[in-house]
Amino acid sequence: MFLSVFDMFKVGIGPSSSHTMGPMVAAGMFLDLLRASPFEAAGLKARLHGSLAFTGVGHATDRATLLGLAGFSPETYDAAKAEATLEAMKRNKEVNPDGLGTLHLDPASDIVFDFGPSLPGHTNGMILMATDAQGDVILQQTYYSIGGGFVVTAEDMASGVSTGDMDPYPHEFNTANELLALCAAQEKSIAQIKRENELSRRSAAALDRGLAKIWEVMNDCINRGLDRGGILPGGLNVKRRAKPIHEALMAERGLNMPAPHTINDWMSVYAMAVNEENAAGGQVVTAPTNGAAGVVPATLRYWLDHVPGATPKRIPEFLLTAAAIGGLIKFNASISGAECGCQAEVGSASAMAA
């Protein structure tokens, strides 16, 4: 099965790939389904189940679902426009997704958190519905947000359909041993094997542009996190820490007295900057999920900023190698924190970065 580098590194929004990106993607899929249907809808509703219900408010799942039903997508997310849309939705109780006209959607009553048993397919389940003028449901679909921004329908889940690309590709491998055997037999690196697979799906120019965009978003996220202070949203009054720690590290740099643990301090502050931006609902890159989005960019940023001989020319090599490792983990186990705990996310990210 082929999982692209762009499957493992998705540009999206915080704070959770399965709780914000997934529901927003699912809402977009439902709008497409509605556009292709013969029904004329008058309103939209959503029912969130399992983890999406119990941690939904803290993870902004309701906001993500509302924005998805309004036509927003993680890749093109505009925070200022999103806030304006949510405010208008509260006032007018309607959305205007492209091609569907004006649809009734009351944020206070049409997004329901169902705290009963989870849906059968996955702990991150949601049901999206379109209603007619009388409020009767005329179209309904169940979606599961399975981690890393991946979304499948109930029918996909029941039939075992994978989220990966099943078409043939040049170098097929489903385990680490198979990948290493390919590298040895062809005298190529993991990154070279992965790049040749990617080139079976897109041009070299498109691949290089995409890889550059991934790092640009990652690096911008680090910079924003290092620059911003204050309190994180969510009501727990958690202070941002990355900025003051970074300022202290920069001050120590001038003393020419680096302690042995400085490497960990720099790595941690870069990762913390991403995590705080993620918690604030900023733009991040799944690596392989939002919950673990800081590990891979922090490792790469540390290498670029602090290791002699590091060069941006090798960023694609790093990202391709990391994506190959992440794909193996997703295919053979899981990258979903909701399924397997935080180890599935941060452990996967650590393996990818290593």
Image (cartoon, rainbow, N blue to C red):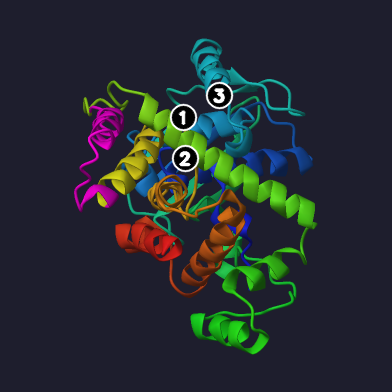
Please tell me whether mark 3 or mark 2 is closer to you in this view: 2
Residue at the disc numbered 1: 63
Q: Earlier in the sequence, mark 1 or mark 2?
A: 2
Is residue 166 shown left or right of residue 109?
right
Instruction: Please provide percent x and percent y for residue 186.
Output: 67, 85
Q: Nearer the viewer, residue 227 or 306?
A: 306
Marks 1,2: beta carbons within 8 A: yes
Instruction: Please provide percent x and percent y for residue 346.
Output: 35, 57
Residue 41 visible: yes
Is 47 part of what is drawn in magenta? no
Q: Using the numbered discs, state the Cα–Cα distance from disc 3 to disc 2 in whole angstroms.
A: 18 Å
Q: Which three-letter amino acid code belongs to the residue tagged 3?
A: Leu
Instruction: Please provide percent x and percent y for residue 295.
Output: 39, 52
Q: Nearer the viewer, residue 99 or 148?
A: 148
Query: SS class of the residue under badge 3?
Result: loop
Q: Using the numbered discs, state the Cα–Cα distance from disc 3 to disc 1 in whole angstroms.
A: 12 Å
Quarter location, residue 222: top left
How packed mark 2 is, by other alpha carbons closer than 10 Å (few <14, some 14-19, many 20 or more), is many
Q: Which three-letter amino acid code belongs to the residue tagged 1?
A: Arg
Instruction: Please provide percent x and percent y for residue 16.
Output: 42, 43
The segment highlighted magenta reads 239-263
Please tell me whether mark 3 or mark 1 is closer to you in this view: 1
Label number found at residue 20: 2
Give the number of marks.
Answer: 3
Label number found at residue 203: none
How packed mark 3 is, by other alpha carbons closer than 10 Å (few <14, some 14-19, many 20 or more), is many
Marks 3,1: beta carbons within 8 A: no
